Amino acid sequence: MARFLWRNGSVCFVESRGIMARTQRPFTLDITAARIAAFNEAQGGGVEVKKSGAGYSLFREDTGEPIARLRRIGLDDHFEVLWWSFRDKWEPVGEFGGVALPLAQALDLIARDPDGCFWH
């Protein structure tokens, strides 16, 4: 199994034959993007996820059309759910302001689409 570690201020790749220095910069694992991708896979796929600013935008893989945007609220697991409106911009879901949900519930809301605003 491959492992990464820090040595002398740079990222090294450790394998059975020894240590090979890498020139690539270290990366941060994005657990939220991984959770969204896992949900997408469990639902049969078809959604592309792009990290943008303080949130994640979801697009149809087949057409590239926007589906939804999840904008992180605070430091916990809550996200504001936005939809791509007829005005060609992200807008909050709901008549009286945005909807903030934990990630799992937000993804379920988008998949079920009870108001018909995500999957047109």
Image (cartoon, rainbow, N blue to C red):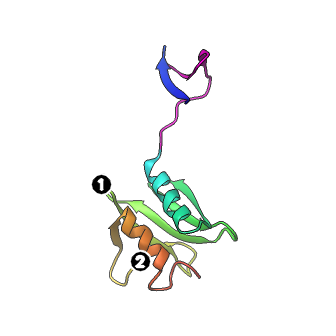
> From what the image shows, is residue 28 above or below residue 79?
above
Quadrant (top left/top right/bottom left/bottom right) for the N terminus: top right
Q: Position of residue 32 (x, y in %)?
A: 44, 53
Kindly check if marks 2 and 1 are in contact, taking CB atoms under 8 A apart as contact.
Answer: no
Q: Which mark is residue 93?
A: 2
Q: Is residue 104 magenta?
A: no
Q: Which mark is residue 76?
A: 1
Circle 2 packing at 10 Å, graded few (<14), some (14-19), many (20+), is many
Mark number displayed over residue 10: none
- Looking at the rendered structure, the kind of residue marked 2 is Val
**Disc 2 secondary structure class:** loop
| Nearer-N-terminus badge (2/1) | 1
Q: Is residue 24 left or right of residue 82?
A: right
Q: Position of residue 13 (x, y in %)?
A: 57, 23
Where residue 82 sits: x, y (%)?
Answer: 45, 71
- Front-lying residue, 3 or 36: 3
Q: How packed is label 1: few (under 14 Cα within 10 Å), some, or many (20 or more)?
A: few
In the picture, the quarter occupied by the C terminus is bottom right
Tell me what residue is drawn at x 66 percent, y 66 percent.
Answer: 61
Q: Which residues are magenta?
A: 9-29
Is 22 magenta? The answer is yes
Q: CA distance from mark 2 to mark 1?
A: 20 Å
Identify which residue, 116 or 44, lies in the foreground. Answer: 44
Q: Between residue 39 and residue 74, name the one nearer to us.
A: 39
Mark 1 belongs to which amino acid?
A: Asp
Q: Nearer the viewer, residue 89 or 5?
A: 5
